Structures are given as structure tokens and as C-alpha cells.
DNA sequence: AAACGCTTCAACCGCAAAATG
DNA sequence: GCATTTTGCGGTTGAAGCGTT
């Protein structure tokens, strides 16, 4: 293992006795001996004053290097192992809020370092952007994350957290992912405000669709009647039926080319309880711009837990079609 | 088995902010 | 108030490991 040794000194002090300032500074990977020295010193003297650590612990390292080694590797409260689905989701959500503020983001992921999160973003997230042939900070990619990746992660987290949620019937409205008595939908993580004054059309966007999809395993949607009724003509849409399953969701974009969906009334009414879902509304136009259908091969397989598995060629093609075509 | 390409991640760098004297 | 030192952050690099040919 190569270890570079640099001789360095401060140019500003070159007029002073050089021997006092020249020092051998070791760079490159840390050895087990160096780790032991650093750990021993910090356990006795505590963190901080890193230049002193470097000097008094017998390490030919810079203070910065000692600090970094401690924070990113030796700290006892570090969490090892790969980033979990929950952590992935959190990183995406926090990054959409704060951008590349890795240190701030890492505060919300106990045991994870900013370096680790930064590396995750660069190696995994940016790779997805590359595969989708768009910039990681582009609107297209942000949309893909918000409307596809993140809902999908939530779905997987939900399904992995046990099907206990779907077998246990909620007993009051407050426990429902959708609160029938209020003007918003919600799941465990996200609250979408319904804008009553702007009308319901804003509600029927892609995030709404994916929210429905993510929640489709929830028991409260069983027996939910979904009917789409055009009031611009005298016919009923072909979608009247029950159960908010995937076929229902995918029927909507499949029919997007039909003119009769203009001014179509949407109502989702659960007959398993006495509440109405708050999604009743009109104007289907916005749905068709960016809604997604979920290919069957997107379904989980037992080992299919990493989000990058979503981005196989077929899915990328579909997403590009649905997201990026104007 | 060797060569090559790709991915990952530990560690470095420069810069800015905060702390210290 | 100022100069210097220390700390913290985000971007980047390159060695190591792994898979493929």
C-alpha cells in the first residue's frame, strides 16, 4: 500500500529557522497503528483541537486529516452498512429541500457522515440521472425523483414494514391515510394540501396518482368505488368499478387520447365505511401530462430492494416517454 | 490468468466561517 | 479591531475491489 510522504512548510515562514517548520506529513490511507493512536488520544483527551491531536498523539498527520479520520471512520456512534430504503428516501427528500448541504442532511441520519451521503448521492443518484440522460439538477430529473422514485421507495418501505398495516383495519378516521373529514390527503410521510379555492384540478397531477398507487395496498381502499363520469356528454367512462388497483390507475393514462375525458367528473367513494374520499373533483386534463403507468416488471422480487433496479431499460424508456415528451 | 473498465468510497484540497489571541 | 489559527464544508481525486472479456 503506497503512502505518500510530503515535505511541507509554510512559505510565509521561510525566513524563520526552517527546521522548526519542516515536518514530514503523511498522506494516504490510515494504518491500524495510526487509528489506534488517534482513538487512544481522543478517548483520553476528547475531540477537538485537532492540530494538537496530530502533534501530541505521535501522528505525522495534519489536524484536518485526524479530524476527518475520526469523524468519518473511527467515531464510535457511526452506523455501518449500506444505506437503507428509509435513509434513501430521507436523503432524497432532504436534498430536494436543501440541495448539496451534506452536513445538514447528515444531521437527520444518525450515524451517517456527510461524506457518506455525498458519496451516495454522487455514485447512485447521479448515476440514475445519467441513465435518464438528464442533468441531476434538471427539472426532469427532480420530477422523476418526486413522482417516481420517492413514491416507489415509500411503497417498498410500506410493503417491507409488514403487511400488518393492510390486515389491520383502521378504527377511526385519523388513522386513515386519507382523512375524509379534511381537505388534504396524507400518508405516513407527506402531506399534500388540497387547494379548495383553485379547484380540484390541481390535485389530479402525477403525485396524486402515485400517492394513490403507493397507498393502494392499504385496506381502506378495498371496496372503494371509483367512477369517472363525463358531464360534457351523456356517456359514462369505461372505468366505473371498484378497487383502486393498478389496472384502474393505468386505465386513466391509457385512455388519455380520448376526447370524452374532457370535463370528466372523478369521484372515489369508499363503500367500506361511511366516508367520502376527498378527491372528488373535475377536470382530468392535468393527469395526462405526466401520469405514469407501472410496468409489471417493476414489481418487487425478493432481492429487489435497491432503487436502481427500477431503472431497467424498459422503465427508462417508459419514463422518458411519459416525463420528457412535450 | 491477465487486461481492462467501471464503481465505490476514503481521503485530499481549497475555501470560508468561526474561534482565538 | 485585526491577524492568525482552527474548524467545517463541499468538490474532487485516486486506490482498491469487482465484474467482464
Image: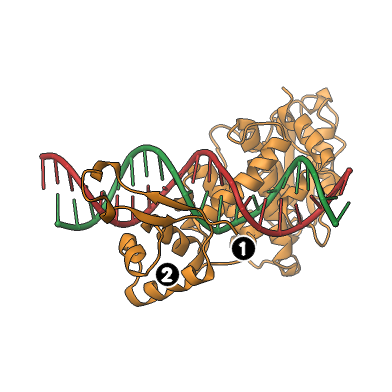
Chain colours: A orange, B green, C red
- Residue sitting nearer the eye, A282 or B13: B13
Q: Is residue A316 visible?
A: yes
Instruction: Indicate whether A311 appears above or below A318.
Output: below
Q: Residues within 10 Å of mark 2 (few under 14, many from 20)?
A: many
- Residue sitting nearer the eye, A237 or C15: C15
Q: Secondary structure at mark 2?
A: helix
Q: Chain of mark 2?
A: A
Q: Earlier in the sequence, mark 2 or mark 1?
A: 2
Give the residue pinned by disc 2: A38
Instruction: Indicate whether A245 appears above or below A47.
Output: above
Image side of residue A245 versus residue A155, left or right: right
- Residue sitting nearer the eye, A119 or A199: A119
Give the residue pinned by disc 1: A175
From the image, which quarter does the N terminus of chain A lie in?
Answer: bottom right
Residue at 76% across, 25% down: A262
Q: Quadrant of residue A50?
A: bottom left
Instruction: Indicate whether A146 appears above or below A325.
Output: below
Image side of residue A194 versus residue A309, left or right: left
Distance, label 2 to label 1, CA atoms, is 50 Å
Q: Chain of mark 1?
A: A
Residue at 74% across, 65% down: A166
Q: Is residue A181 visible?
A: no
Instruction: Indicate whether A286 appears above or below A188.
Output: above
Q: Secondary structure at mark 1?
A: helix
Q: Position of residue A3 (x, y in %)?
A: 53, 57
Residue at 76% across, 38% down: A292
Tell us which disc is closer to us: 2 or 1.
Answer: 2
Please tell me if label 2 and label 1 are on a single chain: yes
From the image, which quarter does the C terminus of chain A lie in?
Answer: top right
Q: Position of residue A298 (x, y in %)?
A: 82, 48
Q: Quadrant of residue A189?
A: bottom right
Q: Position of residue A143 (x, y in %)?
A: 64, 36
Amino acid at each position: 500500500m503506497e503512502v505518500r510522504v510530503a515535505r511541507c512548510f509554510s512559505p510565509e515562514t521561510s525566513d524563520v529557522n526552517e527546521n522548526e517548520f519542516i515536518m514530514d506529513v503523511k498522506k494516504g490511507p490510515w494504518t491500524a497503528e495510526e487509528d489506534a493512536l488517534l482513538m487512544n488520544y481522543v478517548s483520553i483527551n476528547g475531540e477537538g483541537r485537532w492540530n494538537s491531536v496530530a502533534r501530541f498523539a505521535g501522528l505525522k498527520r495534519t489536524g484536518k486529516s485526524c479530524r476527518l479520520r475520526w469523524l468519518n471512520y473511527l467515531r464510535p456512534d457511526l452506523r455501518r452498512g449500506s444505506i437503507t430504503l428509509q435513509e434513501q428516501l430521507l436523503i432524497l427528500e432532504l436534498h430536494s429541500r436543501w440541495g448539496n448541504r451534506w452536513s445538514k442532511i447528515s444531521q437527520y441520519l444518525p450515524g451517517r457522515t456527510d461524506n457518506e451521503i455525498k458519496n451516495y448521492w454522487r455514485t447512485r443518484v447521479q448515476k440514475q440521472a445519467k441513465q435518464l440522460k438528464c442533468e441531476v439538477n434538471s427539472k426532469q430529473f427532480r420530477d422523476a425523483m418526486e413522482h417516481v422514485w420517492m413514491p416507489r421507495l415509500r411503497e417498498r418501505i410500506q410493503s417491507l414494514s409488514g403487511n400488518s398495516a393492510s390486515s389491520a383495519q383502521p378504527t377511526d378516521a385519523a388513522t386513515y391515510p386519507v382523512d375524509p373529514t379534511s381537505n388534504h390527503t396524507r400518508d405516513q410521510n407527506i402531506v399534500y394540501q388540497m387547494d379548495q379555492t383553485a379547484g380540484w384540478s390541481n390535485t389530479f397531477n402525477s403525485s396524486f396518482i402515485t400517492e394513490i398507487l403507493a397507498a393502494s395496498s392499504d385496506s381502506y381502499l378495498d371496496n372503494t368505488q371509483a367512477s369517472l363520469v363525463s358531464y360534457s356528454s351523456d356517456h359514462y367512462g369505461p372505468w366505473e368499478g371498484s378497487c383502486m388497483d393498478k389496472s384502474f390507475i393505468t386505465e386513466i393514462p391509457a385512455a388519455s387520447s380520448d376526447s370524452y375525458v374532457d370535463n370528466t367528473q372523478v369521484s372515489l367513494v369508499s363503500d367500506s365505511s361511511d366516508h367520502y374520499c376527498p378527491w372528488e373533483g373535475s377536470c382530468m386534463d392535468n393527469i395526462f401530462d405526466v401520469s405514469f403507468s407501472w410496468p409489471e416488471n417493476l414489481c418487487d422480487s425478493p432481492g429487489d430492494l435497491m432503487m436502481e433496479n427500477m431503472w431497467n431499460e424498459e422503465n427508462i424508456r417508459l419514463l422518458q416517454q411519459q416525463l420528457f415528451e412535450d
